[in-house]
Image (tube, rainbow, N blue to C red):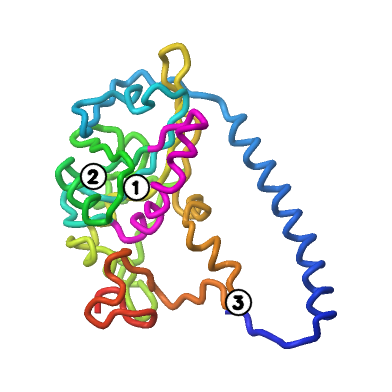
Amino acid sequence: MVGHVTGTRKEWLAARLELLEAEKELTRRSDELARRRQELPWVRIDKAYRFETEEGEASLADLFGGRSQLLVYHFMFGPDYEAGCPSCSTIADGFDGFSVHLANHDVALWAVSRAPLPKLQAYRRRMGWSFPWASSAPGDFNFDFNIAFTEEQEREGQVEYNYRAEAEPRWRAGQEGGGEKAESLLATMCGTDTATYHRDRPGMSAFALEDGVVYHTYSAYSRGLDALWGMYQWLDRAPRGRNETGIWWLRRDEYGKGGKGRDAPCCA
């Protein structure tokens, strides 16, 4: 957290106008990055991916639902999890609010996970969500888009995530810092062990449907998802910012339970 100073309204306004120029530059840079995303070459997808949905088995093209664009959030919910990832859940809390706007702009939004459909449906009911959620099990979709890895890949250090080979995770090397081990804590919240939790990762992918052909147009992982954390966009404008000490967020239905609060550990 940045330490604060006090001052006059005149001093505040001078500093604010200076900051405004930096914000405008960031906005222009963001617009430029969006344009470059849209200029990426489209890659044709010929593999016949299959998904389980509430309406039955579906192809990747079916997920478009008559629209020409599809956004998929790769939600961390592995087949051995008992609950969805708390971080992904925080991002997904915003889906219902804006998905209707996307749908009316020719864009379909889906979450996709490897857990079996009944688990996804039960968790969605628990969280009070209504956005469409498909199971990719037991297919290759998550593996092909580098957000799921086998036990062998993990064991032999053959994990490539966020467009680079991944060094040995700190949790496996016993080097995890801080008062609480982040990966281990999140794994516990999902009802699984750390290694199993780590074999699924977060990400988002964009697709286009043109003349009956599906194309992959964009994917982002890790901190490339930062802008999707709706709460952080608000916290970054709050007086104390993110003010984080480790993993402080909970699932939306866990706050206030069992003495948990702003300063309590997630699994207290």
Residue 234 position in % (x across, y down): 54, 64
Rendering quarter of residue 99: top left
Residue lying furthest bottom: 6
Label 2 CA crowd tier, 10 Å (few <14, some 14–19, many 20+): some
Is 99 covered by the magenta stretch? yes
Q: How many marks?
A: 3
Left or right of 36, for residue 82: left
Report which residue position mark 3 lands on: 239
Residue type indicated by callout 2: Thr
Residue 210 position in % (x across, y down): 47, 16
Residue 123 position in % (x across, y down): 21, 52
Distance from Cα at disc 3 to Cα at disc 2: 43 Å
Left or right of 37, for residue 172: left
Instruction: Give the residues in magenta.
Output: 85-109
Dot 3 or dot 2: first in sequence order is: 2
Residue type indicated by callout 1: Val
Label 1 CA crowd tier, 10 Å (few <14, some 14–19, many 20+): many
Report which residue position mark 2 lands on: 150
Q: Nearer the viewer, mark 3 or mark 1?
A: 3
The vertical placement of 182 against 158, above or below, is below
Dot 1 or dot 2: first in sequence order is: 2
Distance from Cα at disc 1 to Cα at disc 2: 9 Å
Front one among 121 and 211? 121
Report which residue position mark 1 lands on: 159
Q: Nearer the viewer, mark 3 or mark 2?
A: 3
Left or right of 176, for residue 259: left
Residue type indicated by callout 3: Pro
